[in-house]
Image (spheres, rainbow, N blue to C red):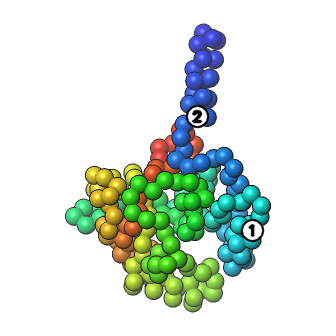
């Protein structure tokens, strides 16, 4: 019995260690807890300075990271569906996909070259925050989704999802914003191997 239990535990450990999380773990350094209001204005400077360090190839900010306990969801209304989907909703710096080495399956990554790719909402003052939210809801936003989210939104292939527009609950005060899918990335597992991949 002990030998069988040991073999099962070893198999599970090997599976967890060798399974593909959808991003490259090697060489990745993660700095947590920089989302405090006083740090937010310094994030761009920090990323720029980290990129200058010897051996650093990419740097990015994000609200989702490996082993993150944070879960941020939003309601997504897909045309032709009576009920909205609940999808993970995370902000990422344009260099996020290169930094994490997450493969794009269709479309493009986010870029500062496109105004609708940028959806920054300041923490404070509140007037600036509300103004930014109103502007984003009025004009819409471009998004990159993972393959699972694209399938749940009705796309049979990643390429089929490109250009699809959905409504997302960007703010409970200002209603839903139009979101256009510009990229579909491979599924990535940011949580425990015991949990399902999140759309």
When the figure is inspected, residue 81 is found, relative to residue 6, above or below; the finding is below
Residue 190 is situated, as x and y percent measured from the top left of the image, at 56, 50
User: Measured from the top left, where is residue 52 in percent x and y?
Assistant: 74, 68
Residue underneath mark 2: 18
Which of 126 and 93 lies nearest the eye of the viewer?
A: 93
Name the quadrant containing residue 54: bottom right
Q: In this orientation, does residue 156 appear?
A: yes
Q: Which residue is mark 1?
A: 52
Q: Quadrant of the C terminus?
A: bottom left
Q: Residues within 10 Å of mark 1 (few under 14, many from 20)?
A: few
* Separation (CA) of disc 1 from disc 2: 32 Å
Q: Quadrant of the N terminus?
A: top right
Residue furthest to the right in view is: 54
Q: Residue at x 57, y 60 (%)?
A: 98
Residue drawn where x is 42% and y is 76% of the image = 141
Q: Could you say where residue 116 lies in the image, as x and y percent from the top left? A: 44, 78
* Residue 185 to residue 1: above or below: below
* Label 2 element class: helix
């Amino acid at each position: 019995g002990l030998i069988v239990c040991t073999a099962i535990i070893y198999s599970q450990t090997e599976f967890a260690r060798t399974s593909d999380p959808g991003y490259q773990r090697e060489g990745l350094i993660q700095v947590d807890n920089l989302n405090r209001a006083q740090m937010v204005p310094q994030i761009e400077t920090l990323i720029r300075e980290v990129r200058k360090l010897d051996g650093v190839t990419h740097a990015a900010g994000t609200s989702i990271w490996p082993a993150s306990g944070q879960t941020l969801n939003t309601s997504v209304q897909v045309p032709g569906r009576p009920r909205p989907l609940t999808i993970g909703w995370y902000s990422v710096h344009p260099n996020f996909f290169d930094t994490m080495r997450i493969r794009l399956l269709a479309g493009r990554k986010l870029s500062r070259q496109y105004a609708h790719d940028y959806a920054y909402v300041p923490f404070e003052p509140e007037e600036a925050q509300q103004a930014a939210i109103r502007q984003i809801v009025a004009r819409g936003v471009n998004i990159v989704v993972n393959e699972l989210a694209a399938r749940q939104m009705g796309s049979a292939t990643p390429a089929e999802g490109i250009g699809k527009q959905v409504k997302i609950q960007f703010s409970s005060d200002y209603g839903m914003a139009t979101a256009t899918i510009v990229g579909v990335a491979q599924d990535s597992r940011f949580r425990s191997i015991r949990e399902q991949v999140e759309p």
